[in-house]
Image (spheres, grey):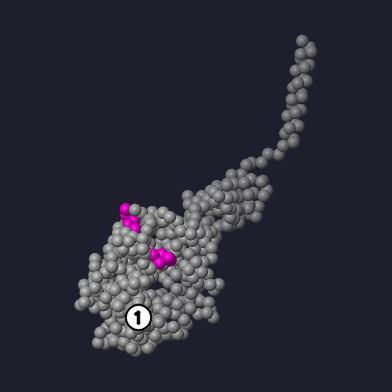
Amino acid sequence: MKTNTLFILFITVFLASCRNEDLGNYDYHEIIEMTIDPLADSYSVMMDIGILEITPRVTLSDGSDPDNPRFEYFWITDKSLGRHDTIGRSRVLHWQAMLPIDAYDLRLRVFDRETGLLWKHETKLNVTSYHGRGILLIGENGQGNVRVQLLGMIQGQDTVLYPDLFAYSDLPDLTGPIDVFHTGNSSTTMGDTRRIWLTTASGSYWIDRYTLRSSINNTLNTYMPTPRVPPLGIVALAPRIKQANGDTGANGQRFIITSDGNLYGCYIGIYGSLYEFPVNCLANDLFTYFPVAPYLFYSLNSMNGVVWYDTLDERFMLVSSALNAYSIALVDNPADPFPWNQAGTGRTLVYGENTRDTEGSSPNGNSFAIMHSDLADSTYIYKFYANGNPPKKRACYPVIASARAAGFDDARFYAFASNRPVVFFVTADNHLYCYDYNPGSESVYPVDTGTSDPITMLKFDREMEPTSDFLYIATYNAATAGGTLTKYALNTMGQATLSPLPDYAKWAGQLAKIVNMSWRGSE
């Protein structure tokens, strides 16, 4: 009995001693809690020009100042494939969006140097580009490489220049700019048939219209059952956008001229965007292909088929529908203003353009062809309505001697007006002229643009404001390595004159050496 009492007393003293020793060896701190408010579920910012600014309200449970240097902030963008970028190191994020267009995880990390505590918060970030509406420009930069730019036109806001729209496209450096265009928003052109196409001398590639990403494999081979090596390029496409909302003149029908001189057609509403066999052949021989000139003639407002030019036999041909696998040789009548078959005339095609000209009961727009004959030393302008089977000839205008003497025959650029019978042209030595071909009042006269800088593009707008004759002229100054794009209005009465629109319709500074333009409508 005495032994048990002493044992219990020993155990009690030992436990008390251990408890006192433990209290003396540990230092307890209150755990600090941090709240961050507000952080939205997601943020969006425009690539290159957009500024992402987030000012979170940070509260610490111990009353510490969140801007105390003891707290380190890290704003980190994260992609699932392993790309991590720290875009900010302070509580307030102020960042210009210099990442490729994509969706990212945005993580905020806060580290307390004194306690070693780390807080984590996450949200979403979308780097976007407002490429749904604006003027697409293609040209060259100072190094001679292709540069695509966008004059983004957001309704109710100032025009914004994207100086290098395809900077993150993953395409290599390209040379020889030709065209950049969107295939349009018509109801049957859905899914992967809606693309932005970039055409150059070194290749043609489609660009995803949302992400603006591409690859060297995004070629016409995507749409051809039998891939070509090397892939074919696009020389011309019809129809093009016909108004500012991005609609085209045909639901489903599409034609392309390829870099090997062939013409393909497809009916997207039935077959998707699939180009299997050329249609520049005749019904009695589907495998003999006639070489195609780089122009497609069709009515801009409503396209039923296309007229094309056979450069071997010097004749105009018709494909009446994209459902047809062949072309039709057009028949001439003695009373016609000009022949479809040029073989007996010695004339050959110099240039072609589609307009909104409606003269001669052509509600959907007439087309023009410039024809020249070395044998007869003469030049003609043909006007015809490409809609219908057969298409309708409207007029033939012999080009007067003074226009030809001014350099009309070998001009660098031509641009036909829609609302009056004039065509502007730029000569080899960079002079701009207007030729009035109205029968009985033909005349040619120089046009002063107020600059001696070389003209690199001359183009009437058929897409943004198609019922108005607005002429766009691009120039380039080699000394400043800068391009300029100016919008001009054409008068409707008297001698044709160009009037530059107010300053908001003139763009300069960071523009490339522009060679072509098109409209990117909203989707």
The residue under label 1 is 372
Residue depicted at 45% across the width and 62% down the height: 232
Quadrant in which the C terminus is drawn: bottom left
Q: Where does the image place residue 384, in percent across and percent down from the top left?
A: 27, 73
Q: Secondary structure at mark 1?
A: strand
Left or right of 249 in this view: 70:
right
Give the side of residue 508 with respect to residue 305, left or right.
right
Dot 1: within a 10 Å radius of its alpha carbon, few (fewer than 14), some, or many (20 or more) residues? many
Q: Name the side, left or right, on which 188 lies relative to 511.
A: left
Q: Residue at x 37, y 77 (%)?
A: 350
Q: Please give the name of the residue rendered at 54% of the width and 63% of the height, measured from the top-left corner.
A: 172
Q: Which is nearer the eye, 144 or 108?
A: 144
**Residue 345 coordinates in the image, percent (x, y):** 30, 79
Q: Nearer the viewer, residue 55 or 256?
A: 256
Residue 463 in view in this figure? no
Q: Is residue 476 above or below residue 256?
A: below
| Residue closer to the observer: 220 or 327 | 327
Is 24 covered by the magenta stretch?
no
**Which quadrant, please, contains the N terminus?**
top right
Residue sitting farthest toward the top: 1
Residue drawn at (32%, 53%) of the image: 270
Q: Position of residue 227 (x, y in %)?
A: 45, 56
Q: Quadrant of residue 281?
A: bottom left
**Count of numbered circles on the image:** 1
- Report the side of 507 relative to 238 (left or right): right
Determine if residue 341 is in view.
Answer: yes
State the image coordinates of residue 250 (x, y, percent, origin top left): 30, 62
Q: Quadrant of residue 457?
A: bottom left
The residue segment tinted magenta is: 258-270
> Given the image, on which type of amino acid does mark 1 rest?
His
